[in-house]
């Protein structure tokens, strides 16, 4: 790994800090986040390694890792960080950056990415979650059309899944939230 | 008024930027200036000679030197004035190097204009200067040392050996401090008791040291050379003149208490000697636990005492000591991890102990007779995990700073586990191993070579599994979380300032840093002097340090005390605040802002037979000439000598015209 290759280290650190409200350069790599993380067994990069990549300005590597999508946002890392860094917030801002910059999530991370996307599309369209359509769309796009089909059937029989969706009264407000998010994101900085 | 102005080139430092001949020309025209000249190095001998000659030739009565910062050479030029028969305080300096040439290197024309302004300001002030005279205050050649740990003992012995009297005050019943609790000490593995107990005996035996144990300083008044100290001798409930130290009372006392000396791993009685080698080796009664005092019953110790020394009626005694200097050596305490670290169990698991508890356990006169055992069941721990930086380097839960000693004592303890328990496994979790010290790195490498497994990462959680503890940490070099089943976990907890340090800082009027350690006045050049003249700092009360550094620090403090005593008197700076009693309204706002507690109220007879009125008075022995009072005084009654309101206004108006 050639660390003298051109990178935009300061820019990436500033961007992540600005979006997450944290100071990632404070991290001294003690690894307490990794030691406490309950989902680290599924990670390709440990939480402290994610922070290290930001510290070194390695944007592609950090945005394309699975860990940022598999993070469960339980915030044990945040609670125990001796340097007061809210790692869960950093992970969240990395997910936002990856989506905006169109960096494809890989492996199991891809499913999380897809689910997030479908979930938000449903909220945007109906103002609430339309479970059946969301799950069908997710199953088709993720290539496993019958995933959780038995549970879906049982839910249908008990009347927990509807074939149509009742739109909420607050749909106009929800639409405004999406507009506002789009406006904020269009003004967000970028690094190369 | 005949003012001489001397402008220095400082080689090219000033001359390379400022147009010095142009400054000379402009300054020569100023009113009151009798002569003005320049020279390449004004501070050099020929430069000084130039000033001396000009003073005689032009009959100068005020001198202005425009050169570097007065911090550097004000004293040099004052001596030139004194040698020429002028009062040394008739000198005014203009800093045209740091304040001008160095910071305006790119703009020589503007720098020259600024230099002229700075010299004009100095000339205006010089016209208002008055002669000032320093005074000599006698010094009481007797020192107070607060704290009887290794730092306090070293300072006391060094001062006493130099031939001066010392009063050593220790709050515990015995001297010895934390070092007396340790087993072996890094990096030489010599036993702490073998080093410290002869020292303790030497302190007690020394004819020049007055040892007061179980005592506290309750007031520090006065100023450098002339302190008045109030000491409270806490009631021991034992008459030390009668007590022979036979120990029967301890044997028979029915009341058992957790031992502070054994860090809660062992017990003592309510009438007790802290440890067998204690100095003085005579007991005190712990009134908070003694049945005689808590329930009004018992009295066994008094009945069994063969010399009739037990005296339940003894009371605290207050008395005064006069000393010339004070050494604060109040040491450290350990950070209370049980309040902060929930992930390590808040102290609920008996097999999670501190490094100091490990020391007690490992010590031959400790609760287990020197055997490393699990406190829960007395079993032998085959797997010991050490966790470093518990409370240190942890701004979220503890302290931001590094405690400096833990890396080495952890390496030492790891080694001792491997030596004492054959086949034991030792894991050490660390963030960085810091071994800056003579033979320290070698010592750490030796622990690794003997089998201690170092893992770079912090521990996130400790939880019980069966009768073991599961330690979940990370190996950041491997990039993976790791788990270790441990029989015993030892935490290297942070060093924090000794209890009572904040109160003592208030009594002594010394400042503390943000972590509560006493603040030295200069971090590099004056590491043992506090913000109050005559009060010195020794050992870890100033910041975390190990035994060799503590002894060196205490020795340095002792030398400062001896230097003060050897002179026998203190020459006071005449730059002190003066109060005009006619203008003073007695509001005492100055007293509130004075950082040196130099201002006190005084009653004076009022005019026209009215009742007495209060005015402020400045103790010139305490005043350091900071000027805070002068700036605060709303009736303009306070002038700082050498920086009077009139002089400052003259400078301002010179700059504004």
Image (spheres, coloured by chain):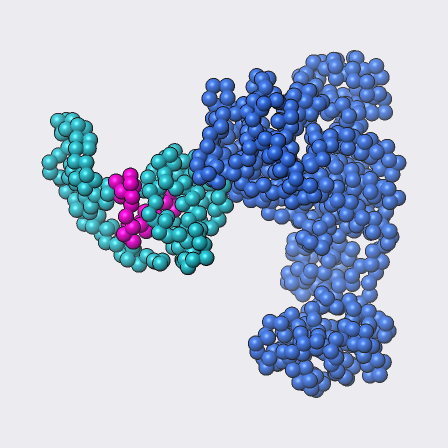
Chain colours: A cyan, B blue
- Residue A90 visible? The answer is yes
- Read off the magenta span: A88-113
Q: Is residue B45 above or below residue A113?
A: below
Q: Position of residue B479 (x, y in %)?
A: 44, 39
**Chief secondary structure of the magenta portion:** helix
Q: Residue at x 60, y 34 (%)?
A: B448
Q: On the picture, is B449 further left or further right than A154? A: right
- Residue B35: x and y, percent? 77, 84
Q: Reply yes or no: does residue A102 show up in magenta.
A: yes
Residue pictured at 61% horizontal, 43% vertical: B434
**Residue B351 in view:** no
Give above or below for A92 relative to B452: below
Quadrant of the drawing holding the N terminus of chain B? bottom right
Q: Nearer the viewer, residue B76 or B555?
A: B555
The location of residue B641, given as percent across then percent down, is: 74, 66
Q: Quadrant of residue B569?
A: bottom right
Q: Residue at x 47, y 50 (%)?
A: A25
Q: Give the image location of residue B48, x and y in percent.
A: 80, 75
């Amino acid at each position: 790994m050639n660390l003298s290759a051109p990178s935009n280290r300061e820019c990436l650190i500033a961007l992540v800090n600005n979006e997450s409200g944290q100071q990632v350069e404070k991290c001294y790599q003690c690894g307490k986040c990794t030691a406490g993380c309950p989902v680290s067994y599924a990670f390709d990069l440990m939480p402290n390694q994610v922070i290290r990549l930001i510290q070194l300005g390695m944007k592609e590597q950090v945005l394309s890792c699975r860990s940022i999508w598999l993070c469960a946002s339980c915030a044990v890392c945040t609670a125990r960080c001796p340097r007061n860094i809210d790692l869960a917030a950093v992970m969240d801002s990395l997910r936002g950056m990856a989506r905006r910059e169109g960096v494809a999530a890989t492996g199991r991370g891809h499913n999380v990415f897809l689910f997030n996307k479908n979930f938000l599309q449903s909220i945007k369209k109906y103002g609430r979650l339309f479970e059946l359509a969301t799950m069908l769309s997710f199953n088709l796009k993720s290539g496993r059309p019958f995933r959780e089909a038995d549970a879906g059937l049982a839910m249908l029989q008990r009347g927990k899944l509807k074939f149509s969706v009742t739109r909420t009264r607050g749909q106009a407000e929800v639409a405004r939230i999406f507009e506002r998010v789009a406006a904020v994101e269009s003004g967000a900085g970028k690094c190369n | 008024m005949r003012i001489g102005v001397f402008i220095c080139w400082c080689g090219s430092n000033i001359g390379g930027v400022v147009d010095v001949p142009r400054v000379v020309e402009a300054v020569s025209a100023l009113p009151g200036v009798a002569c003005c000249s320049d020279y390449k190095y004004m501070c050099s001998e020929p430069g000084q000679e130039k000033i001396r000659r000009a003073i005689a030739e032009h009959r100068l009565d005020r001198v202005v030197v425009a050169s570097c910062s007065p911090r550097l050479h004000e004293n040099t030029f004052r001596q030139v004035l004194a040698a020429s028969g002028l009062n040394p305080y008739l000198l005014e300096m203009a800093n045209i190097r740091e304040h001008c040439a160095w910071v305006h290197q790119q703009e020589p024309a503007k720098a020259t204009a600024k230099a002229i302004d700075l010299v004009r300001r100095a000339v205006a002030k010089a016209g208002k200067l008055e002669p000032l005279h320093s005074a000599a205050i006698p010094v009481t050649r007797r020192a107070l040392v607060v704290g009887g740990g290794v730092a306090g003992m070293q300072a006391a012995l060094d001062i006493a050996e130099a031939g001066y009297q010392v009063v050593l005050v220790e709050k515990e019943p015995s001297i010895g401090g934390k070092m007396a609790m340790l087993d072996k000490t890094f990096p030489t593995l010599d036993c702490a008791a073998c080093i410290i107990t002869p020292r303790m005996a030497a302190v007690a035996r020394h004819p020049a040291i007055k040892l007061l144990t179980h005592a506290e300083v309750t007031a520090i008044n006065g100023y450098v050379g002339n302190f008045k100290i109030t000491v409270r001798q806490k009631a021991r409930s034992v008459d030390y003149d009668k007590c022979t130290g036979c120990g029967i009372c301890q044997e028979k006392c029915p009341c058992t208490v957790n031992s502070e000396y054994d860090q809660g791993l062992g017990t003592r009685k309510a009438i007790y000697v802290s440890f067998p080698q204690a100095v003085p080796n005579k007991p005190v009664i712990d009134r908070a636990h003694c049945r005689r005092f808590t329930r009004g019953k018992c009295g066994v110790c008094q009945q069994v005492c063969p010399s009739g020394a037990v005296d339940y009626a003894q009371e605290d005694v207050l008395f005064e000591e006069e000393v010339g200097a004070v050494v604060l050596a109040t040491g450290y305490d350990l950070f209370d991890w049980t309040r902060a670290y929930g992930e390590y169990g808040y102290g609920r698991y008996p097999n999670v102990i501190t490094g100091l508890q490990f020391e007690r356990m490992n010590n031959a006169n400790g609760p287990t007779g020197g055997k490393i055992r699990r406190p829960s069941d007395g079993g032998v721990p085959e797997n010991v995990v050490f966790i470093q930086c518990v409370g240190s380097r942890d701004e979220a839960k503890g302290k931001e700073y590094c405690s400096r000693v833990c890396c080495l004592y952890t390496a030492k303890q790891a080694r001792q586990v491997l030596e004492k328990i054959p086949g034991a496994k030792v894991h050490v979790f660390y963030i960085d191993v810091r071994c800056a010290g003579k033979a320290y790195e070698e010592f750490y490498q030796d622990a690794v070579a003997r089998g201690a497994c170092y893992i770079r990462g912090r521990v996130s959680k400790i939880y019980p599994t069966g009768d073991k503890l599961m330690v979940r940490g990370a190996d950041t070099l491997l990039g993976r979380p790791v788990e270790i089943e441990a029989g015993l976990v030892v935490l290297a907890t942070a060093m924090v300032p000794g209890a009572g340090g904040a109160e003592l800082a208030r009594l002594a009027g010394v400042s503390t840093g943000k972590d509560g350690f006493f603040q030295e006045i200069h971090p590099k050049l004056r590491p043992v002097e506090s913000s109050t003249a005559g009060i010195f700092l020794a050992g870890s009360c100033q910041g975390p340090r190990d035994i060799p550094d503590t002894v060196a620090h205490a020795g340095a403090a002792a030398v400062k005390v001896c230097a003060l005593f050897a002179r026998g008197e203190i020459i006071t700076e005449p730059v002190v605040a003066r109060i005009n009693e006619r203008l003073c309204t007695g509001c005492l706002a100055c007293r509130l802002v004075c950082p040196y507690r130099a201002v006190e109220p005084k009653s004076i007879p009022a005019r026209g037979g009215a009742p007495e009125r209060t005015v402020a008075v400045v103790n010139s022995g305490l005043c350091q000439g900071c000027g805070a009072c002068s700036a605060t005084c709303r009736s303009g009654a306070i002038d700082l000598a050498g920086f009077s309101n009139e002089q400052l206004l003259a400078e301002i108006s010179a700059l504004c015209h």
